[in-house]
Image: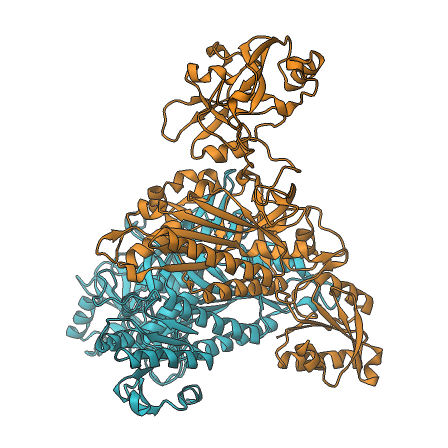
Chain colours: A cyan, B orange
Amino acid sequence: MLLRMSTALIRTLREDPADAEVPSHRLLLRAGYIRRAAPGGYTWLPLGKLVLDRVTEIVRAELTAIGDQEVHFPALLPAEPYRTSGRWTEYGDDIFTLADRRGAAHLLATTHEELATLLVKDLCTSYRDLPVTVFQIQTKFRDEARPRAGLLRGREFLMKDAYSYDLDDDGLRVAYGRHREAYQRIFDRLGLDYSVVHAVSGAMGGSASEEFLATTPVGEDTYVGCTECGYAANTEAVTTPVPPAGDPHRHPAAEVHDTPETPTIASLVELANDRRLAGRDDWSAADTLKNIVLTVRRPGAEAAELLVVGLPGDREVDLKRLTAALAPATVDVFDAWDEHPELVRGYLGPQVFDKLGVRYLVDPRVVPGSAWLTGANEPGRHATNVVCGRDFTADGTVEAAEVRAGDRCPGCATGRLTMRRGIEIGHIFQLGRRYTDAFSVDVLGPQGKPVRPTMGCYGIGVSRAVAAIAEQHHDERGLVWPATVAPCDVHLVAAGKGPQLEAALDLGERLAASGLRVLVDDRPGVSAGVKFTDAELIGIPRTVVVGRRLTDGYVELRDRATGERVELSLENLAEQLTGG
Amino acid sequence: MLLRMSTALIRTLREDPADAEVPSHRLLLRAGYIRRAAPGGYTWLPLGKLVLDRVTEIVRAELTAIGDQEVHFPALLPAEPYRTSGRWTEYGDDIFTLADRRGAAHLLATTHEELATLLVKDLCTSYRDLPVTVFQIQTKFRDEARPRAGLLRGREFLMKDAYSYDLDDDGLRVAYGRHREAYQRIFDRLGLDYSVVHAVSGAMGGSASEEFLATTPVGEDTYVGCTECGYAANTEAVTTPVPPAGDPHRHPAAEVHDTPETPTIASLVELANDRRLAGRDDWSAADTLKNIVLTVRRPGAEAAELLVVGLPGDREVDLKRLTAALAPATVDVFDAWDEHPELVRGYLGPQVFDKLGVRYLVDPRVVPGSAWLTGANEPGRHATNVVCGRDFTADGTVEAAEVRAGDRCPGCATGRLTMRRGIEIGHIFQLGRRYTDAFSVDVLGPQGKPVRPTMGCYGIGVSRAVAAIAEQHHDERGLVWPATVAPCDVHLVAAGKGPQLEAALDLGERLAASGLRVLVDDRPGVSAGVKFTDAELIGIPRTVVVGRRLTDGYVELRDRATGERVELSLENLAEQLTGG
């Protein structure tokens, strides 16, 4: 392949575009890979299309290699199957819906769990037909409230979505593991630095789920990683290491103290130390048990019910974590104190919840045998040595407390958590039977009885991966593509007119004939300096400069990533470039 | 590539699907290439996706070879540019429109003249930047009133659309010609039998246009072809050969006759022969001049105006042809006889139109010097020897008469036209400046003055081409793919269990390793007979049967198209298959 800059639709910009905030967006625009064409919609210019195609081919090859079968579903679909699955309403404003000329409701499908499941129902009748995995690489549409950051969050994007069907949970785990490994191979080949992050399944339903996040400070997704081991998780999915339980009866009896005007943890701790409550002057917020009242509504329930969450006083409730933990129920803050005089605001303690019939969930740190400074359920009074398993019990534990940098890692127990940011480039789910149940999919099992298949789904943001690569592979002068996805292998610069230009074109043709993808800068009237600047902006891994040493039979090879320059003989240049 | 039928999502159907009327639809469903998923929407199964990809690659390669540059525009677009071009309203119900979450009007674009033109406006500033042609291969959506015939007329389909920009008309003609030739190479490589058919540009505007129609009796498009030369045209685009003009004064004077109760041509001709009008008894309908009153409304005009069309009485008016000839004006039948007493219904003659101020257009056969039997503008009376250029003149000619099989070919003047049917697989247009005018696109010309580029556009129905190939390449037993687009090169059938099955799998791997695309039928418990039937239905060009002669080191090679069978030695099978 030989692209000539004199004719190719490549236009570089000297200035940063005004509305481009993140490096990938800025550089993909400036180097002529994409152009904005609509809100959240980009035109892929020739260079960008080449990169997109190379990324697509890597994704396709690795999925085909694990036996996934490529299909292509319609993108425009009647509402009906999405009504059956419940996603028609779950999606809300996030999808584009439309009516056809007869008024029938349709959607632009973002993922195709429904269609894949109906296809399996249609084509698979026996256990012999499973396992099976289908995938497609398709343009998707999503009605983003705030499209931003170029390709990172658009309304139209290219995605790979795959769906696996297995007879049982063991099979699903195998399929899930196979995709997890294929994803690692894909993202490795794409040159991406990424974390595999424990996630909660959220609206997709299902049991296990991990996200692949490309590490970058501009990522929209926050997650935590361990300083010591490979553990990584969304904050929603972080589990708190549980301290050892103790004997509830080793503590002195609970004691109630007058603690006037201590509605906050800080004021309570100060007073406790001032007055040496229970003989101590080393009270900290972590010794207190804070009780937060919330309301929870289960799906389909008429009324919301009260829930109290107890957690160490040095932690705030993270509503996203709590919501994820209680899904599909929804959580709201409580403010009806007037209607609940039995709840003593600011001085709540867990000693009474059982008696009051209020549901009480605690942070995993609140283990049996742990003793707390907490409310005495009387205004202006707190109690010390309130012991879990002796003075109160909880209805269970819940991951509701905020996760903080420095927290102990739940993966290795020695490392500490750090906060990181990333771009979601892949997501894999063990979905289970939500969709096979919704569409009553059964195959004949090996024992002659019907078996309901279990499902996994696996997505990759293909166009987003292009932006993620650009985020991770650039410097102050421009893009620095990994060789696996670069639009071309070699950028030939004719540094001079006349013989250099002719030699560059001739060389370009020879290199292209030997199988290399070549971009040759043959623009007339453009200085060598501008050509070098553009070459660095465009970011093809190797630049070959056809310059003044041409007469001696030499060209210069520049490595975009390292900046290294070497002279090479024209003689066997193709061999050297394809071999190296 | 090695596909195994034991695991691949290939399901053949014994029976014809109830709703599939045309062979391509029936066979693509039965052989497991596609599956209906929505009204006018199909899922491409693995075999179908392979064929679609091969067709796509041929299209891409031939366009890249002529220097077209691949881009990718968003499919979901704001209404604005389509309002500017006027197509937002022109499209009517044929496109899908929708509102985003903010209520802004959008459409799913079928073609991208607007976006391509805006891109050129954005990227091209000088005459040195032209000519340039961009293309994309994209899923398109169209709100078909009646989706039918499977892939032939769906609501979602794959299309290649290209847009060329040139400085002048000569450049446009060169670009148009280059695409015309590329299209011929593409359709030749796809194994299609097709005609290049003169077309009228219709709603696209522009000056010249040709359609590529794949010849098949199930085609929706009717066109005419010549029995002698290569001429082919849509009926709308057929031009009538003009007979030589004569001397208007060589005819006797016009003479008015009582012709009671002859409101139809047939009754008039019968009476004329009975009464030997003007001394003749060989009157035929072709000697009469029929005058049809219509109303025509020009775009933006408040009122419709009268138009009379004169044509030989043996021809009906073809409203599609007349509409195409008068576009963008619209044509309606006239029925307000009461309001126009000056028009004598059934006895209209052209002698008075000039005086009445009524616009009069005639068929091209109505040349100066031709004499006609026509109405005398009095009830019950006709006139003979009414001569064009003496007794009446017309305001021009118009192609309004029906085209009939047997008409003389306008291309070679010796051949005769025959009626044919085809599937539109490609369409090329010389668009001109409609869009560059709409978006005020100018580039700096070589003389320093702004030049407005002129545009061509070129479409190929990629998914429809798959169906067209299936229409032309099948027999009563199934599909018969051309080697260039077949999903696989070789279909290996293990005719027997045990050693044959093992040998087939082993052979499959060896053939795949040598670069062949291989489908191996390794289904357990399926008889050789069923495997052969399925192989014929699926239609891969060559079947290799691993059967009882395996022990002697031989397999059988069957040619799907010819039915020919030869024995081949296992020794160098790969070489023989890749070589042949």
User: In the rendered view, does A555 fall on the left or right side of A239?
Assistant: left
Q: Position of residue B298 (x, y in %)?
A: 40, 29
Q: Quadrant of the C terminus of chain A?
A: bottom left
Residue furthest to the front = B250
Residue, x 53% and y 46% (percent of image)?
B198
Tag count: 0
Q: Which residue is found at the position 15% from the left and 73% from the top?
A: A274
**Residue at 67% across, 20% down:** B283
- Decide: is A94 above or below B53: above
Identify which residue, B454 or B378, lies in the foreground: B378
Q: Is residue A549 left or right of residue A432?
A: left
| Residue B140 shows up from this direction | yes
Q: Position of residue B378 (x, y in %)?
A: 54, 8
Whether residue B415 sits left or right of residue A207 in the image: it is right
Residue B571 horizontal/vertical position (percent): 74, 86
Find residue A551 and report its image quarter.
Answer: bottom left
Image coordinates of residue B325 in percent, x first then y, are 48, 34
Which image quadrant: the N terminus of chain A?
A: bottom left
Residue found at x 48% / y 28% = B331
Would you say residue A164 is visible in this rendering?
no
Pick whichever, B167 or B164, lies toward us. Answer: B167
Q: Is residue B406 above or below residue B487?
A: above
